[in-house]
Image: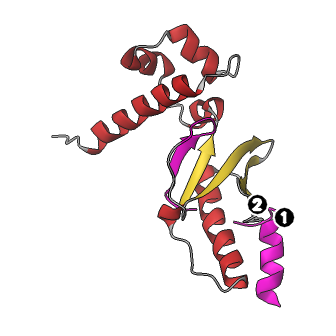
Amino acid sequence: MEKQALFHLLFFGVISNVFITFEFVKTQSIISMRKIVFVVEKTRTGYSAFAKKFDKYPIGTTAITIKDLRKNILHAINLYQDEHQQKHVKEDDIIISLDLQQFFEYYKIINATALAERIGMSQSLLSQYANGIKSPSEKQTNKILQGIRELGKELMQLELE
């Protein structure tokens, strides 16, 4: 009974991390059947997330930070899996989906002006996307995402002396 009560609390977003790959909402990435996409939205008190395929995974949760949200998502999905006698989900099986505006708001350390120059995009246009003034096409979203991933890859291979 306690597990069931906890599940209901998680479902309604009261409780809920994971190192998760960030995808943008408009990106149509190839995702294996085991990946579960969670759409993240900014709220007045933090963040909320729900499974993109809510009919298959009726799971939602909230947290003050994305870091805590990741933990809550993994916890919530595994409680759901337990209730349905299914195998537990691993961190790598979860993808968090953010829109560009939320991405740049959360990752303020990534300078939109410098990123625009790096990927060959108008600084003004990327700024409009980052501020929610315009919505990028799928092609533009993929260009931005590729630039961010390339930067991440470079940083992972960097050594400091």
The correct choice, above or below, for 3 with respect to 94 in the image is: below
The location of residue 142, given as percent across then percent down, is 50, 30
Q: Nearer the viewer, residue 43 or 52?
A: 52
Confirm whether the magenta stretch covers residue 8. Answer: yes
Which residue occupies 54% across, 62% down? 33
Name which residue type carries label 1.
Phe
On the image, numbered disc 2 is attached to which residue?
Answer: 60
Secondary structure type for disc 1:
loop
Tag 2 or tag 1, which sits nearer the N-term?
Answer: 1
Image quadrant for the N terminus? bottom right
Per the rendered image, the range of residues in magenta is: 1-28
Q: Is disc 1 surrounded by few (<14), some (14 to 19) or many (20+) residues within 10 Å?
A: few
Confirm whether the magenta stretch covers residue 75. Answer: no
Q: Quadrant of residue 60?
A: bottom right
Q: Nearer the viewer, residue 58 or 114?
A: 58
Colour scheme of the rendered structure:
secondary structure
The correct choice, above or below, for 83 with respect to 135 in the image is: below
Name which residue type carries label 2.
Gly
Image quadrant for the C terminus? top left
Residues under labels 1 and 2: Cα distance?
Answer: 6 Å
Q: Quadrant of residue 3?
A: bottom right
The location of residue 134, given as percent across then percent down, is 68, 17
Q: Residue furthest bottom?
A: 1
On the image, numbered disc 1 is attached to which residue?
Answer: 12
Query: CB atoms at circles 1 and 2 under 8 Å apart?
Result: yes
